[in-house]
Image (tube, rainbow, N blue to C red):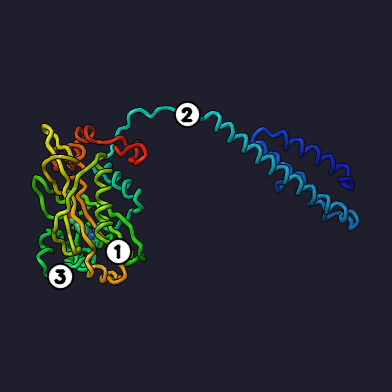
Amino acid sequence: MSDLPADLEAVRTRVLAEISAASDVAALDDIRVAALGKKGEVSLMMRGLGKMSPDEKKIMGPALNGLKADLNAAVDARKTDLENAALDAALASETMDMTLPVGKPNGTLHPVSQVMEEMAAIFSDMGFSVAEGPDIEDDFHNFTALNFPPGHPARDMHDTFFLEDGEKVLRTHTSPVQIRTMINQKPPIRIIAPGRTYRSDSDQTHTPMFHQVEGLVIDKGIHMGHLKGVLMDFVSAFFETDVDVQFRPHHFPFTEPSAEMDVRYERDGAAIKIGQGEKWMEILGCGMVHPNVLRACGLDPDEYQGFAFGMGVDRLAMLKYGMPDLRDMFASDTRWLSHYGFDPLVQANLATGLS
Ligand code: 2NL
């Protein structure tokens, strides 16, 4: 600045040099306070403006303001440089080698979680998405919308756990998730609903809490052929082998017609081999969504049809991975978990094989 008085020019040159020589943020702040703080060199000169003649003020006022602005800008720029340099130094000294092997993880993925992941991978590949809902349900979503008439014996067959309020229940299946989806989304719908379910039943083959995966497809012109195709593809992908199946007529309140699907199997010593063999084993229930269920969800059965299915995850996990006793599943025995558990860092996916 050519019109800056000589002594101001000297202050400017000196303080700018000090700023660029400041070695850290603390030193920089000392320089800022000495020049621009309340009792700083520049601030004191500005206070002196009051005693100046109007002509002097005309020159010194803008000159001092310009000096102050320049020094502030230089302090800010130097501060940014010092902070960046400090960050670079920290990043250089605190490196983390992301290529180091992690070693053996402490925990394992529970076989039920593994099987749920495998099922999600298979159905995702067929265009299904995963839907979830609350474990605590009301009578409408767990029973009424699913075509269980009031007082119908099928309600008792579900061994329902009631909450103390006498209104809410622990869901006896994951079907209420599908009911909520049909009420809230427009078709086409393609979902699976995995989750915990509860029935007051406890013996060699039943635990009061168990896991289900249910599936639902709603669109125009859906028929039993779609149901059979999806479920046949599913079992072969799940058991990672060709699987012969048969569909047997059955009854559920929420589907019409209803069926159970059996798979061929044979014994191989103590082990069970799924796919081929003389014997049949039931592994899931399915059917075409009952018109009353569609209507309860605000859908017109003359416009939309659909199929649904449900299966027990715990039993399918036992079958696939050869676990002998259902009750071990939820005993939290760390020896059982380390024997049957899965590497939590390996994700089930169809490209590299499920398990
Ligand atoms: C079984 C049988 C099944 C369904 C579940 C379902 C859901 C809605 C509408 C119609 Cl919202 N059906 N779910 C259908 C057939 C069978 O489960 O044995 N599960 C373990």
Does the rendering let one see residue 119? yes
Front position in the image: 154 or 76: 154
Task: Name the side, left or right, on which 314 lies relative to 1.
Answer: left
Of 135 and 173, nearer the camera is 173
Tell me the quadrant of the picture where the N terminus can be found: top right
Q: Amino acid at mark 3?
A: Pro
Mark 3: give few (<14), some (14-19) or many (20+) Cα within 10 Å. Answer: few
Q: Tell whether 33 sits left or right of 52.
A: left
Q: CA distance from mark 3 to mark 2?
A: 62 Å
Disc 1 packing (10 Å; few <14; some 14–19; many ≥20): some
Disc 3 Cβ-to-ligand 1 distance below 8 Å: no
The residue that label 2 is drawn on is: 97
11, above or below 176, in the image: above
Q: Earlier in the sequence, mark 3 or mark 2?
A: 2
| Lower position in the chain sequence, tag 1 or tag 2 | 2
Measuring 15% from the left and 59% from the top, which residue is drawn there? 161
Instruction: Return the residue at label 1.
Output: 180
- Secondary structure at badge 2 equals loop
Q: Nearer the viewer, mark 1 or mark 2?
A: 1
Q: Which residue is mark 3?
A: 149
For the C terminus, the image quarter is top left
**Residue in the foreground of this view, choosing between 75 and 307:** 307
Task: Say what secondary structure mark 1 lies in.
Answer: helix
Number of disc labels? 3
- The reply to whether the residue tagged 2 has its Cβ within 8 angstroms of ligand 1 is no
Instruction: Please indicate, yes or no, whether residue 198 appears anywhere in the rendered image.
Output: no
Q: Residue 334 occupies which quadrant of the picture?
A: top left
In the foreground, 301 or 116: 301
